[in-house]
Amino acid sequence: MSRMPANLLKMRVIYDLPVHLYRQDQPDPETMKSPGARLSFLKFLRQDKAPESILTLTNNKRKMDFNAAIWLEFAESPDKPISLWLMCEDEKGCHAELVDEQRVLGGTSLMLSGNVRVTARGEIKSLRLACAGFADEVRFRLGDHHVKLLSENAAHRRAS
């Protein structure tokens, strides 16, 4: 897979990933359905200072593996290959990781999918799925999308 600064590519953002997929301080919405989990989270928010067990990620690497897929439908078949990118904005800036690239052959729909490893420095501000390879006037519709966090490795360091 290839990684490059996101400002070098002309991309259309397709989907903003939910924060709970990549932020460790955000609770998963599924776990917040039980009253006990909601109560403990509210108690955590009301604390005066952060507990010692919270670790900072400043200047530390996080490696996350994602599985991503999208289904695009075009009004007219584009001439150039279409690529799917996972854009990551962290403390060092915004970069993009290539997930998949294909041509639309013999039709007007395309599925792009694959696994990608994102390496980030410090806190991740946003993760987005984006497409590149077609002009602004090309009309398309997002049929479906899927993003799943497969694994994560983080080098944590206590705040000093």
Image: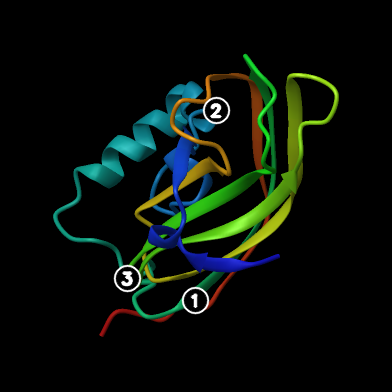
- Badge 3 is on which residue? 52
Location of mark 2 (residue)? 30
Q: Residue furthest bottom?
A: 160
Q: How is the image coloured?
A: rainbow
**SS category of the residue bearing label 3:** loop
Q: Amino acid at mark 1?
A: Lys
Q: Residue at x 43, y 52 (%)?
A: 23
> Which of marks 2 and 3 precedes in the sequence?
2
Distance from Cα at disc 2 to Cα at disc 1: 27 Å
Q: Nearer the viewer, residue 125 or 103?
A: 103
Residue carrying label 1: 61
| Residue 46 place in picture, x, y as percent | 19, 43
Q: Label 3: few (<14), some or many (≥20) within 10 Å?
A: few
Mark 1 or mark 2, which is nearer the start of the sequence? 2
Name the residue at the left extreme: 48
Quarter of the image with the C terminus is: bottom left
